[in-house]
Every structure is written in structure tokens, then in C-alpha cells.
Amino acid sequence: MKPSIMVHGGAWKIPDETHADHIGGTYVAAKAGWAILAGGGSAMDAVETAVSIMEDDSTFDAGIGSVLNRTGGIEMDAMIMDGQMLALGAVGAVRGIMNPVKLARLILQDTDHSLLVGEGARRFAESKGMRLCAEAELTVPREIERFRLLQQEKDYHLSDGFTPDPMDTVGAVAVDVAGNVAAATSTGGAHYKLPGRVGDSPLVGSGAYADNHTGAASATGHGESIMKVVLAKTATDALGRGLSVQEAADYAVNHMFERVGGYGGIILVDCDGQTAFAYNTPHMAVAWADENGSILARIKE
Ligand code: GLY
């Protein structure tokens, strides 16, 4: 099986002055994931590595650079899913760790559970030797400034942030040489969200899904819309009905808009390693390995 990878760095109105950072950040992530696959490594390792690199890049709303909630704190969501046995690990509203996707992988591997949230998730991270960090290590000046502006907007509603300004949730999908598919998604969520708000990213079938029988998907955009239409599973189910990978990605995003008026995007890989993406926002940041293993990174308009 020829391996394949695609990553995303969010779908929204990406400001012109940050296009280079988005292209660079997704490029580096896709390249690292591709190196693992090309060396015979697993799709799970590839998507975890790609997403953790984007968590470490303050360009994106995940890990360092996460958006601030209504009390100025950072609560992060992430999921990783293995298409072989439909195994998944996810974390919701976790504070004070650098790499939520790595914690999600540990939940998958080392517990009987699929989703840990809040303080319990943080305590589990500590028990596994993950470094706990101060919120200041995750907080960037861009988000402090945004938080201060939003504090002054008395009538701000969460969905305002997604029409057309969702943030930079990150994700990756891959197929490895053994034919196993995997998906991972990570986010700081929606800016100015209520404390305790969990978005689509750690919800199986919404923010990500992976099944060796169909394919793997990672979503980005307005979480409250994505979860209503179970966007990632909608896309992989469409593959199962015989749609091409591009048709399935388009179908899922169009369905979300027609059914609930939601904005966002999705990346998708089928079992043959064909990749596609779709979005209904002004921009989407994506990178992938082409058939020669060259990495292409774009801000699509
Ligand atoms: N899609 C990211 C979120 O809504 O939290």
C-alpha cells in the first residue's frame, strides 16, 4: 500500500499577514508525518506527530497559541483515532499541558476509556509523566489582545466567531503501508467560549473519524454545527456509499451548511490513499504529500 497524508491548519478568514506562517506550519507538519510513513511507520504515529508539531506552533489555535475563554483561561480538546479497530482516545477541556494529542494517544493506549475531561485528564497526564505547564506558556500576545477586544463587545455570541472567522483547529489524516488509516484533531476551541465548553474536536465522528473500511477525516470550523451533523463520520460514511473522496468531502460540508448553516472544512483520505478537502469559509490551510512524496502546502481560497 502506498502511504498518504494530508494535514490542515484551520478553515476561516485567515489574515493575509499570517498566510506564510500557515503555509510554513502545515508544510512542516505534513513533511514530518510523511517521513514516518515513508519509513514504514504507522498512520497513528504520523498523525500524532503532525498534529503535535502544529500544537507547538503558535500560529495555530491548538496547544501553544490556543484561544482564551471567557475568563481568560485555555481549555483544549483533542482526539486521535485508529481505523484498524476503531480505537480512539480523546481529551476535553484540559488545561496546562503542551500536547493534548499526545495525551489523547495515551488515553487510547493505557486506559479502558475513550475520553477524559478537565482535571481528571490533567491528573492522568501527570501520572503518565507528561510535563504540566503554566497557562502562560500556552498564551500568546495575539490571543490576549483578542480577548481584551471581545471583553468590550457586550453582544458577542460564540457563533459570530465562525461567520466567517473560525479559528485554527489543526488536524491530520493518513494511510500507512499496512493499509491502516488514522485521524487526529486538536484545538483550543472557540474564542471567548464559556469555561467548560467542549467543541466537536474530541467527539468521535464529529471532529475526527477513522475506519479502515472507509477512510479517515478531520474537521475544523464551528464546533456546535460540526457536532450536529457528525461531520467526520458523515464524510467517511459517504465514502462507504461509493462517493469519490472529493465528492464525499464536498457532500459533508454542503450538508452541514444546508442543514444547520455551519461553516468549516474537512480533510479526508480514503482506503486507497486518495486525499481531498472541502470548506465553505474564505480560506483553508492544507498540506499533503503528492504521489512523488513532495510536500505541497497551500492557503486555498
Ligand atoms: N472546531 C473547533 C471547535 O469548535 O472547538
Image: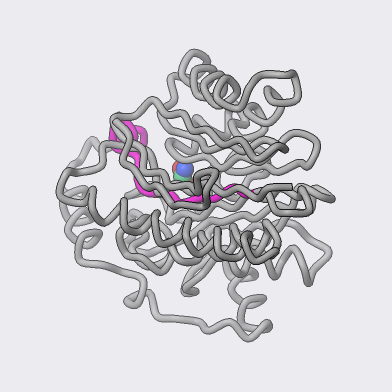
Q: Residue at x 65, y 27 (%)?
A: 234
Q: Nearer the viewer, residue 70 or 44?
A: 44
Where residue 31 appears, x then y in whole percent?
47, 60
Where residue 180 appears, x then y in whole percent?
76, 50
How is the protein colored in the picture? one colour
Q: Residue at x 62, y 54 (%)?
A: 79
Q: Is residue 44 left or right of residue 84?
A: left
Give the quarter of the figure containing the C terminus. Answer: top left
- Start-end of magenta stretch: 158-174
- Quick check: can you spot residue 68? no
Question: How many callouts does the rendering have?
Answer: 0
Where residue 141 appears, x then y in whole percent?
20, 66
Q: Residue at x 45, y 66 (%)?
A: 53
- Quick check: can you spot residue 186? yes
Say above or below: 59 vs 242: below
Say above or below: 203 vs 68: above
Say above or below: 234 vs 135: above
Farthest residue to the top: give it.
258
Taking the magenta stretch, the answer to whether it contains residue 121 is: no
Q: Nearer the viewer, residue 2 or 203?
A: 2
Taking the magenta stretch, the answer to whether it contains residue 161 is: yes
Q: Is residue 165 left or right of residue 96?
A: left
Q: Residue at x 68, y 44 (%)?
A: 204
Q: Is residue 91 left or right of residue 21?
A: right
Where residue 112 appears, x then y in whole percent?
83, 64
